[in-house]
Amino acid sequence: MDHKVQSITSIMKILDEAAMSTLVDIGALVPHLERAFAGPLEAPPRAHIDLPGVDASTLLLMPAWRTGGNVGVKIVTVDPARSGRGHHAVNGVYVLLDADTGEPAALLGARTLTATRTAAVAALATSYLARPDAETLLMAGTGTLAPFLIRGHAAVRLIHRVLLWGRDGNKAAGLAGRLAAELPHLVFTVAEDLVDAVRSANIISCATASLEPYLPTEAVQPGTHVDLVGSFKPTMKEIAPALVTRAQVFVDKMDALNESGDLIPALESGALQVSSVCDLRTLLRHPERRRRDPNAITMFKAVGMAEADLASAEFFLDRATPKSSLS
């Protein structure tokens, strides 16, 4: 694919959330990201700014560039409390700058971009780390990311059963009903007992804004793959350090070791060594590091990759652009 986009002097492309929602294809985005990560994508540490106010709102600035190619910047605010007020927890825009001129070439809705790329990155890791025979997925969390993550994991493994767990049982039941209508080949069940659900799952995907660990460590069975995308600050935790010590740990970027409350306690106690952690792009370059032991517990912790944002923005623009008009 030619990633050069038209200059603003010609036309600035705008894809709002509604337009992007019609272009989502996580199954196609997964191999696109795998190819993109093999190329010259780069990103500095993201700016992570806590905003003043009653609720814990965070401003994230996430730039990335393709060497000799496009530059992109995602600008979002994240506030989980907004969900309770009828608003989205993540809101913002993605700005793509032309490779040659530096002019703004495209503006994309960051909410759909973030949810789609998060699920695709998680699914890409799952394709390397989950057992090939994994068929039961536990989705912990019923927010915006949950449907995307379910679609992503189902795109890379032959998932037959999805267990949905959330603190609000009514919300979990409503989501199960909507997804069952959309994905009739999957059997959706609301998990009332989290311990039993964890014991039954081959893949566990966690996407909550929890400040305290809730996943029962002792219930995680050998051979399970655990996918964690909720925690992106040291104060947020979905798992206890005891689970980290049982697992082979993989991260989207090594920045996760400094940002995620899921990993920091285990690092501080010495239970987890930096040298034992593998980032996603290293995993892709060295397939021998993928799952070999069927009884191993693997864990993938993601806090967000700006490189994936850029590659995903190019993916959406390519799908929205008639092939005859690409330069």
Image (tube, rainbow, N blue to C red):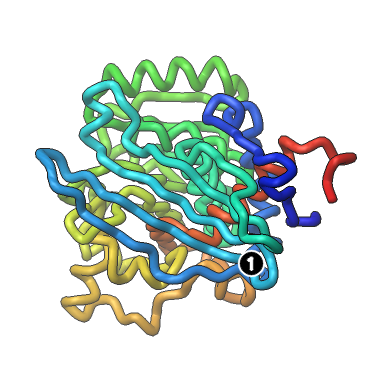
Residue located 47% across and 17% down the image: 178
Q: At which x and y percent is residue 31?
A: 69, 53
Looking at this view, name the residue that lies furthest to the front: 9
Residue located 39% across and 56% down the image: 61
Left or right of residue 28: residue 73: left
Left or right of residue 148: residue 75: left
Does residue 314 show up?
A: yes
| SS of the residue under disc 1 | strand
Could you tell me the amino acid type at mark 1?
Arg
Residue located 12% across and 42% down the image: 53
Left or right of residue 125: residue 324: right
**Foreground: 89 or 141?**
89
Instruction: Check the image and report above or below for 228 versus 20.
Output: below
Which residue in the structure is indicated by mark 1?
66
Tell me which corner region of the image, top left, top right, bottom left or bottom right, holds residue 318: top right
Rate crowding at label 1 as few (under 14), some (14 to 19) or many (20 or more) other CA atoms within 10 Å: some
Q: At which x and y percent is residue 254?
A: 40, 72
Looking at this view, name the residue that lies furthest to the left: 54
Tell me which corner region of the image, top left, top right, bottom left or bottom right, holds residue 4: bottom right
**Foreground: 76 or 224?**
76
Q: At which x and y percent is residue 26?
A: 62, 41
Q: At which x and y percent is residue 148?
A: 50, 36
Instruction: Check the image and report above or below for 141 versus 237.
Output: above
Instruction: Check the image and report above or below for 317 versus 277.
Output: above
**Foreground: 72 or 219?**
72
Does residue 135 show up?
A: no
Question: Which quarter of the figure is the N terminus placed in?
Answer: bottom right
Tell me which corner region of the image, top left, top right, bottom left or bottom right, holds residue 289: bottom right
Residue located 21% across and 58% down the image: 240
**Foreground: 25 or 241?**
25
The number of discs equals: 1
